[in-house]
């Protein structure tokens, strides 16, 4: 009887240890929010990264408030980017900044959605504008061009980024200096169309390019 009690105790202890060591179930990945950017040149669908939560949440707040509806892309540079997000022209923003959330996982490939900001001289912490954003167009670069860029900037482009810049293009000189918080997943041709419009002083389109942004999910 005593031996049986000891055996039962050993089994219970072993069972407890097994349950204690059982691996936890993998957490379900958080769903990425999609937004729709409508323009007269076509529509763009973009996702917002969960790894930049302050930018994601601020952007969604403004979208739901209707902040961007009727606003314009006020700065457009072909082979570079299209910028918008201010109300009644480029100077009006919500009156606050968003702390930088620069993530090495995300970079300035074509279609990257990133936050505009003031230059380092007056903004050493690289805080983002409360509302202004830009979408990268950029251009494709070959190994020679990327090598020259690395020599001039003393920055090394890792193999993953290099492959992307060679295949779809982008603007590597902005990497690790601005917060990239999303990307266009459909409608890249619209970026090209807007980037090609006629512009005047300050790279402002001669004819306003208005937008409307809504949350898809």
Image: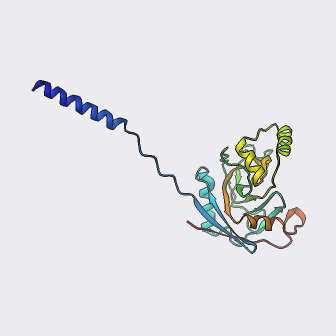
Residue 60 lies in what quarter of the image?
bottom right
Residue 206 location, quadrant? bottom right
**Among all residues in the image, which is located at the extreme top?**
3
Vertical relation: 120 (above or below) 189: above
- Horizontal side, residue 48 vs residue 19: left or right: right
Q: Where is residue 46 in the image (x, y as percent from the top left)?
A: 65, 62
| Residue drawn at the location 58% of the way across and 67% of the way down | 216
- Residue 176 percent coordinates (x, y): 73, 44
Q: In front here: 110 or 49?
A: 110
Looking at the rendered image, the quarter that the N terminus falls into is: top left
Q: In which quarter of the image is the C terminus?
A: bottom right
The image position of residue 62, as x and y in percent, is 63, 64
Depth check: give the residue in front, 129 or 178: 178
Side (left or right) of 78 relative to 185 = right
Front-lying residue, 64 or 145: 145
Would residue 177 be seen by someone viewing this image from the given angle? no
Q: In this view, does 91 lie to the left or right of 203?
A: left
| Number of marks drawn | 0
Which residue is outermost to the right? Answer: 201
Q: Residue at x 61, y 52 (%)?
A: 54
Answer yes or no: is residue 139 visible. yes
Q: Where is residue 185 in the image (x, y as percent from the top left)?
A: 66, 61
How are the residues colored?
rainbow
Q: Is residue 177 above or below residue 4?
A: below
Residue extending furthest toward the bottom? 40
* The one of 104 and 189 positioned closer to us in this rendering: 189
| In-image side of 199 versus 127 (left or right) | right
Question: Picture quarter containing residue 135?
Answer: bottom right
- Residue at 77% x, 61% y is 83
Residue occupying image coordinates x 81% and y 36%: 154
């Amino acid at each position: 009887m005593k031996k049986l009690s000891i055996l039962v105790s050993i089994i219970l202890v072993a069972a407890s240890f097994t349950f204690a060591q059982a691996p936890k179930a993998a957490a379900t990945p958080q769903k990425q929010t999609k937004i729709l950017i409508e323009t007269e040149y076509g529509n763009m669908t973009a996702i917002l990264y969960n790894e930049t939560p302050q930018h994601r949440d601020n952007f969604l707040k403004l979208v739901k408030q209707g902040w961007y509806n009727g606003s314009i892309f006020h700065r457009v540079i072909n082979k570079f980017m299209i910028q918008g997000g201010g109300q009644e022209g480029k100077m009006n923003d919500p009156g606050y900044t968003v702390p930088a959330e620069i993530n090495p996982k995300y970079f300035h490939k074509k279609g990257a959605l990133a936050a505009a900001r003031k230059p380092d001289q007056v903004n050493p912490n690289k805080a983002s504008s409360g509302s202004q954003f830009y979408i990268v167009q950029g251009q494709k670069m070959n190994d020679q061009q990327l090598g020259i860029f690395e020599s001039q900037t003393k920055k090394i482009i890792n193999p993953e980024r290099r492959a992307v810049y060679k295949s779809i293009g982008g603007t590597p000189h902005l990497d690790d200096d601005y917060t990239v918080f999303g990307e266009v997943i459909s409608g890249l041709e619209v970026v090209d169309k807007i980037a090609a419009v006629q512009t005047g002083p300050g790279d402002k389109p001669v004819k306003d390019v208005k937008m409307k942004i809504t949350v898809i999910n």
